[in-house]
Image: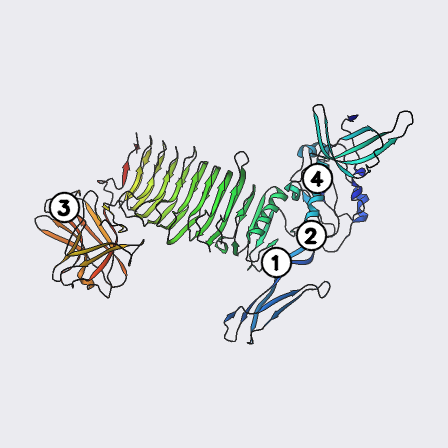
């Protein structure tokens, strides 16, 4: 037969016996000791304190290693010496040795012992933790002091167990249970802990309990009976990771700092105030430990990264309430893995919250396309002042997040072509998004997919994309595309951004400066768009877009196949190409300005001019879709070989116009064996015929050749005759 007694007072003396023989060290907890529990009296414990003159003792160095620079007699750096550490020969001492087995003289400089200082709190100094304080109890009952601990260095596991048990024991009311059964239950021992699982009616008990007493009655008349009293230690006992918020014991944890911040030092950092020391290999381990420490100890705070390079070989994992802060470009996170550099990932209903990533530089030893910073199901997240250099794939990516700020970052692809699409910033299924004052540049891709400077996929209200500068993006493929900004959400605002040099030369549909997207009631205001080889600002669909005060110039591409990456020759859209005295070799892989191929142009008849025209035929009455009175620019890149090529004076890019007679405006190269940019500008005043061409003059010899690449023809200025600066395919678009 079993009964459950009502909750009642259990004095602390019954449960503190396991610690009464230990030497106590001071710890102060401001909070509620519930249901009659009391700590030992301070006066009773003071005799057990060990007092030292120093408040903090340095008692050792963790992960100690010898650092130095070695040179030969010519001051050439060498790395051929052997370093050893002997920590066993002499008690309490460590010997470092450097062995030179090269047979040559070596000189050492900057010799240092590096490691993480191990500190112990001594004297009367203690730790004040109020992360779990019960403010209502403090107002009603005042502050109550609990002092526990010892004066010995403890293992991390020991600290976890002691801290976790003490916290759980003191934070909740406890119950006493009695168990009455026939027979002699002599195997229960007072003071021992047991697991109690008990079902009685609708009550289910699962608890860790301590045996308080065992009473056995022996009767010849009634038989034997045993009554066992159990004192609850913890209901539904589980270990959790918040132990660090409860107690800090001895020198097993990083100490010597104040407040909710820790410093993680790079391998090259020379200061002595760090709580975590990296060694240049898998440095994410120490950074993650620091993040866990701050989260566990204070519920949030700051992890500071020193100057120097941190080698990242797995993702750094952000936790709620923790800000990861570097020291600007002096703090470098160099990724060497197929993983994110930093990730913050929660779940639907279990979102992470209040995370900041700020003030550091990202570089790459790897060449993977994984996002540099990734946040999923993370609310109130801010990514600020991050310098991403040499981007291969996605820079900053957030998905399913509420309250997002991405501001003051620099994302640079370094003009390196990669096979992956490049996205500077990507936001998907988020709310309350601010993408502000970022600088994105140099994103070059050969992928068949689309690259974006900023891409905001479907979100709800609260999107602002403002003050960003996006430049020098390039697609070097026949498929895919390149967009400065694309927003597909409803009611977003695209304000005061600067977009320039967005180039995808295959045809006029591959590059877009700003794509307002498919969402309704999106506003594009006061943006500046310049030199986009497609459409400057495009409303592809959607209802009620507002287009207000934008400046868009020099956009468009009126040629097809102009990046010379496929079999068809470049020509005006809807027209065709033609040639005379020329052999055209498309997809020539021997030379290329961008991408993998170019157009090889060889003369076939000495004494005759060789032409490749970007029109189907030359006629005095054919404008090939161009508008009279407008100004156009034809540009191309050319390479003249010093061996096998004509003279540079024999090579021309030309626009020929007919206004009663033919007259040409031309541009030619100035050097050999290099790619040069040529440009011709022509205004079609009173013109009835137009001819666009490249040519090798008749003075060249049969078989001599040049290579052409990345050809473009577009209207100059704000003229929108060809819907090159602005294109509206939406419904009820508003203009102001």
Q: Nearer the viewer, residue 723 or 529?
A: 723
Residue 188 lies, in percent from the top left, at 81, 36
Kind of element beneath mark 4: helix
Q: Tell which circle, 1 or 2, labels the residue nearer the N-terminal end.
A: 2
Instruction: Name the residue tied to disc 1.
Output: 272
Kind of element beneath mark 2: loop
Q: Nearer the viewer, residue 67 or 234?
A: 234
Side of 241 relative to 380 (left or right) = right
Q: Quadrant of the N terminus?
A: top right
Kind of element beneath mark 1: loop
Q: Tell which circle, 4 or 1, labels the residue nearer the N-terminal end.
A: 4
| Disc 2 residue crowd, few under 14, some 14–19, many 20+, Cα 10 Å | many
Residue located farthest toward the left when viewing the structure as drawn: 660
Side of 322 relative to 127 (left or right) = left
Q: Nearer the viewer, residue 132 or 561?
A: 561
**Can residue 687 be seen?**
no
| Disc 3 residue crowd, few under 14, some 14–19, many 20+, Cα 10 Å | some
Instruction: Name the residue tied to disc 2.
Output: 251
**Can residue 44 be seen?**
yes
Q: Tell which circle, 3 or 4, labels the residue nearer the N-terminal end.
A: 4
Residue 257 lies, in percent from the top left, at 63, 51
- Asked whether the residues under the numbered discs 3 and 4 touch, taking CB atoms below 8 Å apart as contact, a structural biologist would say no
Alpha carbon of mark 1 to alpha carbon of mark 2: how far?
Answer: 17 Å
Q: Tell which circle, 2 or 4, labels the residue nearer the N-terminal end.
A: 4
| Disc 1 residue crowd, few under 14, some 14–19, many 20+, Cα 10 Å | few
Q: Quadrant of the C terminus?
A: top left
Alpha carbon of mark 4 to alpha carbon of mark 1: how far?
Answer: 33 Å
**Dot label at residue 46:** none
Instruction: Name the residue tied to disc 4.
Output: 167
């Amino acid at each position: 037969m079993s009964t459950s007694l009502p909750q009642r007072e259990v004095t602390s003396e019954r449960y503190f016996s396991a610690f009464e023989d230990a030497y106590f060290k001071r710890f102060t907890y401001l909070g509620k000791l519930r249901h009659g529990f009391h700590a030992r009296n301070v006066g009773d414990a003071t005799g057990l304190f060990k007092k030292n003159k120093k408040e903090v003792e340095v008692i050792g160095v963790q992960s100690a290693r010898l650092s130095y620079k070695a040179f030969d007699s010519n001051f050439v750096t060498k790395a051929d010496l052997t370093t050893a550490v002997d920590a066993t020969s002499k008690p309490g001492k460590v010997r470092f040795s450097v062995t030179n087995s090269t047979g040559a003289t070596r000189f050492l400089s900057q010799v240092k012992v590096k490691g993480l200082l191990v500190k112990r709190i001594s004297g009367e100094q203690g730790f004040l933790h109020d992360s779990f304080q019960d403010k209502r109890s403090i107002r009603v009952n005042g502050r109550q002091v609990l002092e526990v601990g010892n004066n010995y260095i403890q293992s991390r596991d020991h600290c976890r167990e002691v801290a976790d048990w003490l916290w759980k024991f003191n934070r909740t009311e406890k119950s006493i249970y009695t168990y009455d059964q026939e027979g002699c239950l002599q195997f229960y021992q007072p003071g021992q802990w047991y697991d109690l699982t008990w079902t009685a009616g609708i009550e289910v008990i699962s608890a860790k309990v301590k045996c308080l007493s065992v009473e056995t009655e022996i009767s010849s008349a009634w038989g034997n009976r045993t009554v066992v009293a159990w004192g609850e230690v913890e209901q539904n006992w589980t270990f959790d990771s918040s132990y660090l918020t409860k107690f800090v014991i001895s020198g097993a944890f990083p100490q010597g700092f104040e407040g909710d911040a820790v410093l993680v030092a790079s391998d090259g950092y020379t200061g002595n105030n760090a709580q975590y020391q990296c060694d240049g290999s898998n440095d994410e381990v120490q950074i993650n430990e620091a993040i866990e420490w701050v989260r566990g100890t204070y519920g949030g705070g700051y992890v500071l990264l020193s100057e120097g390079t941190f080698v990242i070989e797995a993702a750094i994992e952000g936790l709620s309430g923790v800000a990861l802060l570097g020291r600007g470009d002096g703090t470098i996170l160099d990724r060497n893995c197929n993983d994110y550099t930093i990730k913050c990932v929660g779940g639907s209903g279990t979102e992470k919250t209040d995370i900041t990533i700020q003030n550091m530089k990202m570089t790459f030893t790897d060449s993977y396309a994984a996002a540099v910073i990734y946040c999923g199901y993370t609310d109130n997240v801010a990514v600020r002042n991050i310098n991403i250099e040499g981007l291969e794939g996605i820079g900053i990516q957030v998905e399913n997040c509420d309250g997002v700020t991405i501001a003051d970052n620099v994302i640079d692809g370094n003009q390196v072509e990669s096979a992956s699409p490049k996205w500077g910033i990507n936001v998907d299924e988020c709310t309350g998004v601010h993408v502000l004052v970022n600088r994105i540049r140099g994103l070059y891709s050969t992928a068949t997919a689309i690259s974006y400077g900023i891409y905001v996929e479907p979100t709800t209200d609260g999107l602002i994309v403002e003050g960003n500068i996006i430049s020098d993006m390039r697609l070097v493929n026949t498929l895919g595309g390149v967009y400065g900004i694309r927003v597909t959400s409803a009611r977003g605002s695209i304000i005061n951004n600067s977009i320039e040099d967005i180039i995808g030369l295959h045809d006029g549909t591959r590059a877009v400066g700003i794509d307002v997207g498919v969402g309704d009631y999106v506003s594009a205001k006061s943006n500046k768009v310049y030199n986009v080889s497609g459409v400057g600002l495009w409303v592809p669909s959607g209802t009620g877009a507002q287009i207000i005060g934008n400046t868009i110039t020099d956009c468009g591409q009126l040629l097809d196949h102009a990046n010379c990456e496929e079999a068809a020759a470049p020509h005006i859209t809807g027209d065709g190409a033609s040639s005379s005295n020329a052999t055209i070799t498309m997809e020539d892989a021997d030379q290329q300005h961008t991408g993998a191929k170019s157009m090889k142009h060889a003369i076939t008849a000495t004494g005759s001019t060789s032409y490749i025209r970007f029109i189907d035929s030359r006629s005095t009455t054919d404008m090939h879709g161009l508008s009279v009175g407008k100004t156009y620019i034809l540009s191309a890149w050319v390479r003249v070989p010093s061996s096998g090529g004509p003279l540079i004076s024999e090579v021309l890019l030309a626009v020929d116009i007919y206004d009663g007679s033919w007259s040409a405006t031309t541009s030619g190269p100035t050097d050999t064996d290099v790619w040069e940019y040529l440009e011709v500008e022509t205004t079609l005043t009173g013109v009835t015929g137009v001819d666009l061409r490249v040519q090798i003059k008749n003075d060249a010899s049969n078989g001599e050749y040049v290579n052409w690449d990345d050809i473009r023809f577009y209207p100059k200025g704000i003229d929108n005759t060809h819907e090159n600066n602005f294109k509206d395919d939406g419904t009820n678009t508003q203009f102001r």
